Image (spheres, helix red, strand yellow):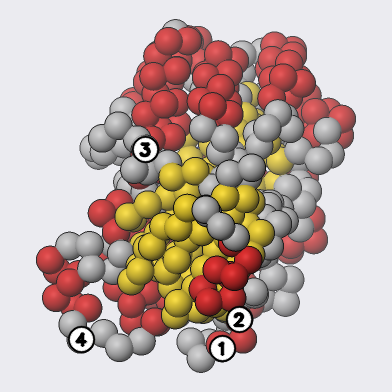
Amino acid sequence: MTSILLRGRTLSFLRWPETIDDHAAWRYEGDGGLLIRDGRIVAAGAYAEVEKQAGQGVEEIDHRPHLLLPGFIDAHAHFPQMQVIASYGAELLDWLNTYTFPEETKFRNAQHGRRIARLFLDEMVRHGTTTVAAYCSVHKASAEAFFAESHHRNMLNIAGKVMMDRNAPEGVLDTPQSGYDDSKALIEEWHGKGRQLYAITPRFAITSSPEQLEMAGALCREHPDLHMQTHLSENHAEIAFTRELYPQLRDYTDVYEHYGLLGKRSLLGHCIHLSEREADAISDAGSIAVFCPTSNLFLGSGLFDYQRFRSRDKALRIAAATDVGGGTNYSMLRTMDEGYKVIALNGEKLNPFQSFWQLTRGNAEALSVVEKVGTLDLDTDADIVVLDARATPAMRLRMETIETLAEELFLLQTLGDDRAVREVYVAGRAAKSDMAT
Ligand code: GUN
Ligand code: ZN
């Protein structure tokens, strides 16, 4: 059995913090300890107490004065888009046709997929993200590459081969049958292997024929414990085209409802321009609206209505995500900084405790993985991020005038990036310092 004892200022959340003074919503230890055995947290609390349980010879790593939090969770990203990020000048549909689909054709080549999967998960870890819900390309080999790399690192990741059979170049198309067969084979090989979870992944209504959505629905029925991820209501031209393709259905959301794709593990990327009926339907199904602020700003898609979705009578479950490479940064700190601004443009505020709840426990609840990650609870997996609020000269200077934990968190969100991530533990193993730079 391998054990380590981490020392530092520990912070984790018990529930959504209603206000900045809602201290009962989080647990903070100014001198905290986490005892990790075989990749799991076996004791947590005040260092003086945890240390007593550590026993002789346990390796101790002193991270004081830094903060120890549950590793960040990214609820939506595209690993094949690492060489799409920062592509100039287009809105969604042009951006897909001009940059994204041509780039994704390269993942026919399994070796390319293996290289990018490795670099993508390096980037996740570098930025403090220990779990990501990832889209692969249409090619089965791309999902094999992603899962092999994720399994090798012992990360808890959720991923799926994209299903898409129309309105895109030949090199990124499958068929209803091959999309079903490849997904089925990948589920059998990877779902539940180590920490890997499979997500059924029809890209969006525009690139799937009714026959393909039918098959995706069949997969959901056959595997009710799996996630389903897709895109919904991101951009006006996308919505109009979807309405032309599915004129008999009530609205965009009804397309996914009709084919049995809305459930408690359905992750719906964007959800910007929903009608009240659509929001009600998503709420009734218990599905998750995924907020991707850097992407929504970059592609000029619109402003996600975070606080309204949370507070409406039929509230929505919400996750936050980078959406790399429509999104412009791998960092969940940068993501929540942009998220704060989007919410401000809607006339609301997200306080720093709410932000860090979202990045950790909130996203874990939204992804139905909170029994395993997203908290520092006993018997959960030791996925941990170590944050340094003095990581850069500008942060150090600002920290001179900061007095509260809330202010420190807000500084980390506003100026922080991968430089503020001092270490990352994946199932108890130091993964950032271990990585080739
Ligand atoms: N809609 C369908 N595919 C995509 C994608 O790759 N990125 C974004 N942002 N939206 C999409
Ligand atoms: Zn996306």
Observer able to see residue 115: yes
- Give the foreground label among 1 and 4: 4
Image quadrant assignment for residue 248: top right
Work out how far the residue at label 1 is from the one at label 2, CA to CA, in angstroms: 6 Å
The answer to whether the residues at label 1 and label 2 have Cβ atoms under 8 Å apart is: yes
Amino acid carrying mark 4 in the image: Thr
Q: Is mark 1 within 8 Å of ligand 2?
A: no
Residue in the foreground of this view, choosing between 181 and 33: 33
The quadrant of the picture occupied by the C terminus is top left
The quadrant of the picture occupied by the N terminus is top right
Q: Residue at x 56, y 22 (%)?
A: 148
Q: Is mark 4 within 8 Å of ligand 1?
A: no
Q: Which structural element holds mark 3?
A: loop
Q: Residue at x 58, y 44 (%)?
A: 2
Name the residue carrying label 2: 25
Amino acid carrying mark 2 in the image: Ala
Q: Residue at x 56, y 87 (%)?
A: 23
Work out how far the residue at label 3 is from the one at label 1, CA to CA, in angstroms: 37 Å
The answer to whether the residues at label 2 and label 4 have Cβ atoms under 8 Å apart is: no
Name the residue carrying label 1: 22
Amino acid carrying mark 1 in the image: Asp
Work out how far the residue at label 3 is from the one at label 4, CA to CA, in angstroms: 34 Å
What label sits on residue 434 in the rendered view?
3
Going from the N terminus, do you reach mark 2 or mark 4 first?
2
Q: Residues within 10 Å of mark 2 (few under 14, many from 20)?
A: some
Q: Which structural element holds mark 1?
A: loop
Q: Is mark 3 within 8 Å of ligand 2?
A: no
Name the residue carrying label 4: 401
Amino acid carrying mark 3 in the image: Asp
What label sits on residue 201 in the rendered view?
none
Q: In the shown orientation, is residue 324 left or right of residue 377?
A: left
